[in-house]
Amino acid sequence: MNIEIKNLSKSYNGTPVLENLSLMLTNAKPVCLMGPSGRGKTTLFSILLGLIKADSGSITGIENKQFSAVFQEDRLCRQLSALMNLAIVQDNPDKAQLAGLLKKMGLTDDEIRRPVSQLSGGQKRRVAILRSLVSDSDIVLMDEPFKGLDDDTRRVVINQVKDLLAGRILMVITHDEQDAELLGGDIVEL
Amino acid sequence: MKPSTIWADKLKKLTGVFFWLAIWQFAAMKIGKEVLLASPVSTIKALISLCGQSVFWSAIIFSLTRIMLGFALALVTGVLLAGLSAVYDAVRYIFAPLFNVIKAVPVASFIILALLWVRGGNLSICISFLMVLPIIYNNMLAGFTRVDKSLLEMAAVFRLSNMKKIKYIYIPQVLPYFTAACTTSLGLCWKSGIAAEVIGMPAGSMGNRLYETKLYMDTPEMFAWTVVIVIISFVVEKGFLWLLDKITARITDGFL
């Protein structure tokens, strides 16, 4: 499974953010996008998700494909528990299995069933990451997913990401080379 | 809060009530004319006497059902129109001048105007509907337009069904606006409905009975009716909010 991005360009008010970007995403290896702020990483993320349109260029291989994502912000439903935030992205959720995955991410029984508004920033981040992985998708996009996680938690979470990816395409925006190393991904500098 | 603190708080509130009752009694005794100012004692006597009459209860049922029907109609219409206005700008632009006019026109003008079109019995339905509709509409529209767009984007990416979007995104975010709208409009609805009945005088209504007390200069009974109106307004508001709380709790139980 491949996604081919060809000569993609996007400007905001005449200021180019992406200029003729070409990139290949495959399910063989995650792609880790790196680079300073303002280079269009999040813009590319939004274009792929269909949230904004590119000015020119083409993306092939995403027809009839389903996406899931970890946004820069957690974008969790605050009144819902961690468990319910995962359950709503599935058609027939197996709550026991989802609870097991949350526990593997380091959440306790009590934390799993508490409204996510009562969880810490790191815990919310782990729920958001897990949500993207338990969703029935072909392509997983993550925008700075490990931000705010300590080193030990980061390792646990990245191992979970690798376990649950199951042959899907993964593109991760990160500022940390170590994340790319742990994920075993290809680094693409923007 | 400790039980002793709760009791102390209640006692303080009751002291305030008794203070003003005493002032009322004192003023009535000083004036010495029940026609001008009925005392609390004669008001209570009139109230007890009213409670024994079947027409008293039928007047309450008559007014309560009609005013609450007006409220319910405004609730449904307001929510639907606000939902449509949030989605289609054209609907918002069409209804904005109408609701601004309704808000600006005095209730009395509406009542007199409505009397030309509506039968006396249905006047309170019409007036309570008109008074409540802009409040529900504006509050709900504010709620709908302030729904977190980033969550809607998330819902689109994860392909959440419309049902899930309504249940898990819209309802939790719009509910506080709905509660505020109901709290504000319930009291107004009740007062404007009774005012409509006083002017329209539909037979068998509370407003008509209140008007008759003025005709016969029966001030204690007029005070008694006023007390009844205040009590019903209080009970209806508290009862509705209690029901809303229960419904909210049922919905949010499924969130955890």
Image: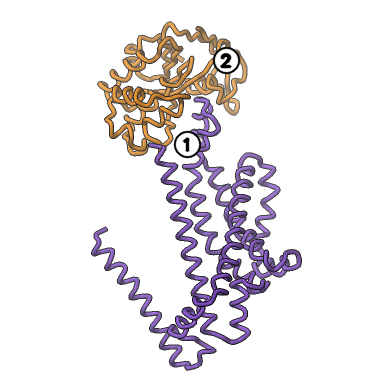
Residue sitting at x 52%, y 59%: B184
- Image height of A68 relative to B48, above or below: above
How would you rate the neighbour count of disc 2 (Cα within 10 Å): few for under 14, some for 14-19, many for 20 or more? few
Marks 1 and 2: which is nearer the front?
1
The chain holding disc 1 is B
At a point 34% along the width and 15% down the height, the residue shown is A177
From the viewer's side, name the closer residue of B220 and B175: B220
Tag 2, which secondary structure?
A: loop
Residue matched to label 2: A64
Quadrant hosting residue A32: top left
Amino acid identity at mark 1: Tyr
Query: Residue type at mark 2?
Result: Asn
Q: What element does badge 1 sit on? A: helix
Query: Which tint is chain B?
Result: purple
On residue A131, the disc is none
Relative to residue B199, is residue B238 drawn left or right? left
Task: Give whichever of A26, B176 is nearer the camera.
Answer: B176
Task: Identify the disc placed on residue B168.
Answer: 1
**Chain A: drawing colour:** orange
Where does residue B110 sit, x and y in percent of width and height?
A: 69, 66
